[in-house]
Image (spheres, rainbow, N blue to C red):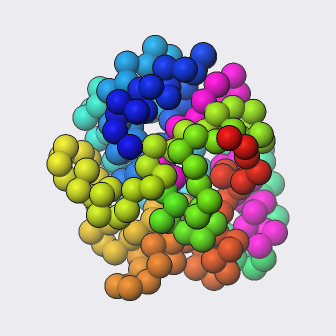
Amino acid sequence: MSYKLLKQITSKINGKIALSFSYQAEDTAALHLLLQCNIKSLEVFTLDTGKLFEECENLHKQTEEFFKISIKRYLPKSDDVKNLENQLGEWGIRESLQNRHLCCHIRKVEPLERALKGKSAWVTGLRAAQSVTRNELKIVEYDEKFNLFKINPLAFWSDDELFDYIKEYNLPLNPLYAKGFKSIGCKPCTRAVNEGEDIRAGRWWWENPEHKECGLHIRGTRG
Ligand code: SF4
């Protein structure tokens, strides 16, 4: 999608637009497109789970400087994190899907609910090519869970299109890609992948592919 089409779409949105930034090349490309759309009320935010890679922390600063913006951090509630750590210890998240979902809920989903409160649209870097859980993705959807429009400008971009775009505009790129990571998430739940492995194979690699979402992008949308 060109920024011109994105501009047409976002110009129809009344109210505040948010972009979620999770240190992946997709988010940087989506941000670059969005900043050309002259949006009056835009918030760029990240979910600071407390489990980020150091490379992501560095990219946070680099991205703010490059685009001359501020990326707002939403943190999990400290009491919930304390209880979670007491309940699961360091590696309880790998013992069951339920445990892992509990951690994702506390560290990601609840902060996301706060981040999206009062927003009219949510721009993401999701691509259909990323996984089996995303192959029905649309450019514009209505997210009934969060009650807002969800705009996915990169929905039909291939890997090559994405990285060519990053290169063309010399955009900041997470150094984890050069270390073999193809999808980037929290440190305990993300690993590098081997040549030929699926793009999301390094996320929650001990689970089945159809479970590989954190609860942020639940389908059940219209439009
Ligand atoms: S990705 Fe892993 S560490 Fe991050 S919130 Fe989910 S379970 Fe917790």
Task: Please say whether residue 113 is one of the residues in the magenta stretch.
Answer: yes
Please, what is the dominant secondary structure of the magenta stretch? helix
What x and y, as percent, mark residue 108? 66, 49
Residue placed most toward the observer, 56 or 151? 151
Task: Please say whether residue 101 is one of the residues in the magenta stretch.
Answer: yes
Residue placed most toward the observer, 51 or 2? 2
Residue placed most toward the observer, 14 or 179? 14
What residue sits 69% from the left and 22% below the top? Answer: 118
* First to last magenta residue range: 97-126
The quadrant where residue 65 appears: top left
What x and y, as percent, mark residue 37? 37, 24
79 up-or-down from 182: above or below? above
What residue sits 32% from the left and 56% below the top? Answer: 162
- From the image, which quarter does the N terminus lie in? top left
Residue 203 showing in the rendered view? yes
What residue sits 28% from the left and 53% below the top? Answer: 173
The quadrant where residue 61 appears: top left
What x and y, as percent, mark residue 117? 70, 27
- From the image, which quarter does the C terminus lie in? top right
136 up-or-down from 114: above or below? below
Residue 56 showing in the rendered view? no
Give left or right: position of 141 versus 100.
Answer: left
What residue sits 75% from the left and 63% below the top? Answer: 101
